Amino acid sequence: MAVEEEGLRVFQSVKIKIGEAKNIPPYPGPNRMRDCYCTVNLDQEEVFRTKIIEKSLCPFYGEDFYCEIPRSFRHLSFYIFDRDVFRRDSSIGKVAVKKEDLQKYHGKDTWFQLQPVSADSEVQGKVHLELRLSEVITDSGVINHKLATRVLECQGLPIVNGQCDPYAAVSLLGPSRSEAKKTKVKRKTNNPQFEEVFYFEVTRPLSYTKRQFDVEEEDVDKLALRVDLWNASNLKFGDEFLGGVRVPLRVLSQAGVHDAWYFLQPRENGGKSVKVEELGSLRLNIVYTEDHVFPSEHYTPLRDLLLHSANVAPVSASPAHTLGEVCREKQEAAIPLVRLFLHYGKIVPFISTIAHAEVNRTQDPNTIFRGNSLTSKCIDETMKLAGMHYLQVTLKPIIDEICTEHKSCEIDPVKLKESENLETNRENLRQYVDRIFNTITTSGVRCPTVMCDIFFSLRESAATRFQVDQDVRYTAVSSFIFLRFFAPAILSPNLFHLRPHHPDPATSRTLTLISKTIQTLGSLAKSKSANFKESYMAAFYDYFNEQKYADAVKNFLDLISTSGKWDQRSIETPIMLKEGFMIKRAQGRNRFGMKNFKKRWFRLTNHEFTYHKTKGESALCSIPIENILAVERLEEESFKMKNMFQVIQPERALYIQANNCVEARDWIDILTKVSQCNRKRLSTYHPSAYLNGHWLCCKFSADTASGCTPCTGGLPANIQLDVDGDRETERIYSLFSTYMTKLIKMQEACGSKSVYDGPEQEEYSSFVIDDPQETYKTLKLIVSAVQTLEQQHTKYKRDKFKKTKIGSQEHPIGDKSFQCYIRQQSESSTYSI
């Protein structure tokens, strides 16, 4: 979800590898072991949770998490919890990384020390204050100076134990000062509107020689205003601290009025007296990306260059191939390139061209597509994008079964437990392999068309290049569909969205054995036993040394490498797209029934959207996809609940609350995409609910009144290929900009190759340059397009810096920005004089 900034869209995303924790403090009991899990939080809102690792003080998680960040945030936080089946789970420690510090750890494996978790330090949100210094004449004619403090509102306060009933405590700090005043409590809101004013005496009666409204410097330097936010609790432990700010009164030295937003801060003594080393540490790899995307016309020169790549001869001189040459990892280039070419329908000719060039450079048919080339990485990425739902249909049911049944499949005699039988385990494993093999080899009709077209191209190029080898037309395709698609998905189902978490060690071992066997079956190697280093695997593979397995693989490969024969959209098998628990409001089908909120299991397929009392039970309600007229967010004011959205049907709207902001965005996106082609989709909707006889947004009394707000922009109906072309071009620009020195070096290499016929210089040997002159022309065009976009970014940053007003709602004053605010106010005052 993008944030609009004066014609520019800003996207935030984060990719996290949660590795492991070590040296967690032992449980204070005879067992000493802990059952730990890790959560990922935007500020204090949990957006992801790992599985629980039982009985360990050094838990290994090995889980990946990616999300588009739909809102502003201050901290990306990670909490380690110890599960307690009898009480509330207890927090052991946390890692909190400020947004501005995320780039320090970009893409690096980093060990972070766990910090203490204290209620006093768990703060978020901001407060709007107005301070005014005024002169008051008493009845006796004496002049006093009073400070009027207006507490206007707060936004984004934390929710404590499911509730937020905030109030503000305001006090004046200084020598012999301890005055404190409180606002009224605002019930059931974390965005309270206070609008209350408090008065404090700032100076005693003095004989003044200074100008009116001046305050003695000694007093101002010693005084500060303290505003603390509290949650009014009914518990015996007292009210909970939500955050506070300390405002030195010297902010009034330039003018008599100070109006600003402040980030709430933790109390200075909020941390517990625990040594950091005693809490352990957590290994993380964080990749935070912020894309600033300009209007589409700014990207036309670079985009046109890239999309023309398949027509450049030789293809090694094309802009897309050049990106792969200069990037540190081919994967860096492949991800945005594939998404861009998919978006514009040019992925098949591009991959066909670079694959054909790679095949012509290959000398041995046994090594075809075995390296980590740009071709291999682009095909990998295409399969991930286009084939995700293909995996859901083929592998997910059996993978779910394997993860649930926990059958023992260990066939290594050394690892066998005393209670296990080797022959029983072999039979369990053989049955799993047989079922998965049959599922894969009979799924050819479901293989996405774009994958079939690419496989057809690979097959033709390989067969033409190596006409003597009759099997190369199969191995060219199997090296991708088995080796790089099905086998990795079986090995790590969580990375392919087949399971929510990495499997437990025993199940992971079972999946490893299955993956190895499937990979070997699909490879059509001449000597199968030679493919296994382990003797027990070679012995197990004897079960499958029959011609019928090789024939099944070849028939499957023939089917999926027949271009354009099958169209995935014609398949009527329901595909499960998303499922999970959410809270829904009763739809009011019964006029006199209570419209309360209940937790339900929601399930979305390409046919219908249903909810159930719990997972596995029959549907309580089914909404056909063609009946979904719009899917939009629901404003918080409707039910005083966050993360709500509405699924609008012909007769009524279904109001749903997701568990967090990321999950709400994911549900809205997938529901919108799957219903995008419905003929009766609405163009307007009501952003608030219909309550007490009228719409809260527009106040119309008729429940059938047309919407008062335009629906959000449409998205492509092709679910798995939904791509923002401008955003991908921006990412490619960013890569070219990052590796500009390599582009320059590549230009030098072209010049060196053109002028000198001798041995290639070592510093240029890493580049593939088949035609120096054509490559040089391309590089010159790339550099020109990148520099033009660089100027746009520089201008945007300069203009944004000029317009940034510290203390505004968009840029509140934080712990590090107070001095910048004072300097900005001083410069503003000087300029106005």
Image: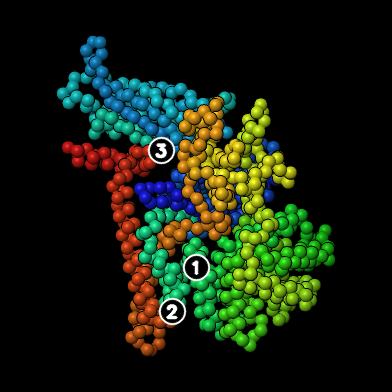
Question: Does residue 120 show up?
Answer: no
| Residue 215 horizontal side relative to residue 674, left or right | left
**Residue 346's mark?**
1
Rendered view: 785 above or below 11: below
Of the two numbered discs 1 and 3 on the same chain, state the one appearing first in sequence.
3
Kind of residue at disc 1: Lys
For the C terminus, the quadrant is top left
Kind of residue at disc 2: Ala
Say which quarter of the image contains residue 207: top left
Kind of residue at disc 3: Phe
* Between 720 and 146, the one nearer to me in the picture: 720
Q: Secondary structure at mark 3?
A: strand
Is the C-beta separation of discs 3 and 2 under 8 Å?
no
Residue count near mark 1 (Cα–Cα under 10 Å), binned few <14, some 14–19, many ≥20: some
**Residue 263's mark?**
3
Residue count near mark 2 (Cα–Cα under 10 Å), binned few <14, some 14–19, many ≥20: some
Q: Secondary structure at mark 2?
A: loop
Q: Secondary structure at mark 1?
A: loop
Question: How far apart, in angstroms, are the residues tagged by discs 1 and 2?
Answer: 17 Å
Residue at 57% from the left image edge and 24% from the top image edge:
234
Residue receiving disc 2: 313
Residue count near mark 3 (Cα–Cα under 10 Å), binned few <14, some 14–19, many ≥20: many
